[in-house]
Image (cartoon, grey):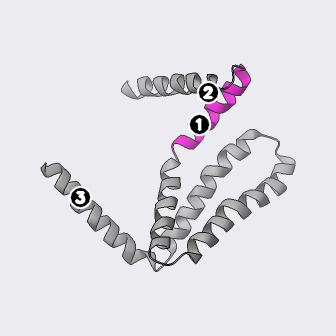
Amino acid sequence: MYGEGFYFLGGFSLFLFISFFNQNPDVIAIGVDRAKICAFFYVLLGFSHVVSSLLRGLGRPVMPMVVMLVCWCAVRVVVLMTIGQSVHSLYLTHWLYPITWGLSSIVYLLDNNLLLIDLIFWIDLLRILCWLIDL
């Protein structure tokens, strides 16, 4: 019951936000559809940005650069130039962004050098959460 209410309020607020920029109902519907598709997957985007920033801070900038260029640039261009020629739908681009975010997250998770960093990160995160709970 609460889920439907939040979903309705979220959809309505998306409608209001997009209508500030354009009052065309078709444009608003497309914007709301894109937001509904991408919103669930923004955690993958955040994960990719955090890991790439972490690696750059550790002095390992090559892997984030390659992952971003391949997963976010090359894959999108190749898919749009190949599949986009036969599938003429905005939903292809709506879904392509979350797919490439997931692809980059998987690449980061499969990197053997990140396993130790991930373990240290999660241990520190748990310590911070325990500290916050004790407050």
Amino acid at pointer 1: Ala
* Residue 68, placed above or below residue 88: below
Q: Is 69 rendered above or below residue 12?
A: below
Q: CA distance from mark 1 to mark 2?
A: 10 Å
Counting labels gives: 3
- Neighbour class for label 3 at 10 Å: few (<14), some, many (≥20)? few
Disc nearer the start of the sequence (3/1):
1
Q: Residues within 10 Å of mark 1 (few under 14, many from 20)?
A: some
User: Mark 2 = which residue?
Assistant: 18
Task: Give the residue pinned by disc 3.
Answer: 128
What span is colored magenta in the figure?
A: 24-40
Q: Which residue is mark 1?
A: 35
State if disc 2 and disc 1 touch (CB < 8 Å).
yes
Amino acid bearing label 3: Ile
Task: Give percent across and percent down for residue 35.
Answer: 59, 36
Q: CA distance from mark 3 to mark 1?
A: 31 Å
Identified at 71% across, 41% down, the residue is 91
Q: Earlier in the sequence, mark 1 or mark 2?
A: 2
Marking on residue 87 = none
Q: Nearer the viewer, residue 134 or 11?
A: 134
